[in-house]
Amino acid sequence: MIKIYQRNIIYSYLKNIITVTIVFLSLSFFLNILEEIKFFKNTGASIQYPIFLTFLNLPSIIYELFPFIILISTQLFFLNAFNNSEIIIYKNFGLSNLNIIKIISLFTFIFGIFFIICFYTFSAELKHSYLSFKNKFTDDNKYLAVINENGLWIKDETKNYINIINAEQFKNDLIENITIAQLDNNFDLVRTLTAKSANIDNNNWKLFNVKIHNSKKPKENYEKYEFFSNFDRSRINSLFSNLSSQNLYELSILMKDYKKLGYSTLEIKGYIYKIISLPFYLMIMTLIGSILMYNGKYNSSKIVVIIIGIIVSVLIYYLIYFSNLLGTNENLPLIISTGLPFVLLFLASSIGLVSVNEK
């Protein structure tokens, strides 16, 4: 059962989280709506579209910024506790410095679990709606790429044809067992191409073992055939790899589809690991924020300590980012590249907690 002083600590800490989140929401809204207004500038759309899209995009922005929100909230919690002598009151209840940090760190970890289950799912759904709605105002609705259990599907509009492309396998720069249906502007079938494989390293695809079926001409066979597409490997990846618009269940389905295609699942696994590791990330930020404030409580300029905390949080972000990159680039096993930064940060925090306990 939660004791009164524990409830007061959690309530006070949660108040700071809510306050900082509102500040970040306001700033994100202002900055994002400027981007959306710029995007719709030449479309003739009314102001309601930028506002609507901004609201759809805000939850995913807050999700990405939440570790920073937690660190600043932790610093503000201790700043208020020091200024209002609440730390002395807590100590009168028999709480040590470590006990206080333990309470808010455990709360943050549990909060992080619920944050993934509820808020991430919510933000992913809105992000999907955001991308779908925004796509209507771009040329990308002419160029679509999807992966499902039936393989890779591409819709590609060129000067003369609308190409519907299906490939059963996708491995690095090669797609295999390809069928291309070429339609005219009235969506009537003009001809069909089948190929054993194709190199899609650039826009001029190199097709191998090609058969061309045209109702007005005899069947044509080619060992090699050059085929122009608006897609290359990088563009295909960019169109269907926005993982933040998919919830954990959808990510797991996507990973199964990638495996069937023989396509690398490292990027999806890395993103799933990133989501699952969020509670540890939030707890680390809580520990670091606590250590900085305890060590800087005698500093007359608390704002300097908070600025240092923000700088440290940015450095931690890049440490985690580059470590994850080592995993997705296969320089390290993915589980190690995901967990290593948190192990190192926890060890560093443990050293800092020793000094905090002595204060």
Image (spheres, rainbow, N blue to C red):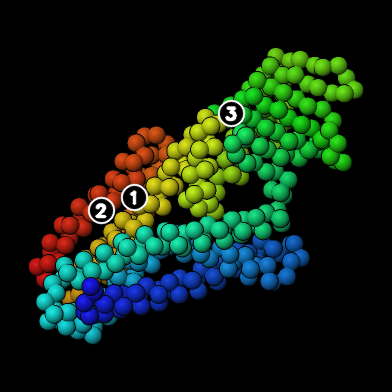
The quadrant of the image that shows the N terminus is bottom left
Q: Is residue 167 left or right of residue 76?
A: right
**Spatial distance from mark 3 to mark 1, Cα to Cα?**
35 Å
User: Which callout, 3 or 1, points at the residue further toward the start of the chain?
Assistant: 3
Q: On the image, numbered disc 2 is attached to which residue?
A: 345
Q: Are marks 1 and 2 in contact (CB under 8 Å)?
A: yes
Q: Are marks 3 and 1 in contact (CB under 8 Å)?
A: no
Say what amino acid the circle numbered 3 marks: Gln
Q: Is residue 135 left or right of residue 119?
A: right
Q: Residues within 10 Å of mark 2 (few under 14, many from 20)?
A: some
Q: On the image, numbered disc 3 is attached to which residue?
A: 169
Q: On the image, numbered disc 1 is attached to which residue?
A: 319
The residue drawn where x is 49% and y is 71% is 25
Q: Is residue 181 left or right of residue 112?
A: right
The quadrant of the image that shows the C terminus is bottom left
**Spatial distance from mark 1 to mark 2, Cα to Cα?**
10 Å
Q: Residues within 10 Å of mark 3 (few under 14, many from 20)?
A: many
Asked if residue 4 shows in the view, the reply is yes
The residue drawn where x is 52% and y is 29% is 262
Callout in the foreground (1, 2): 2
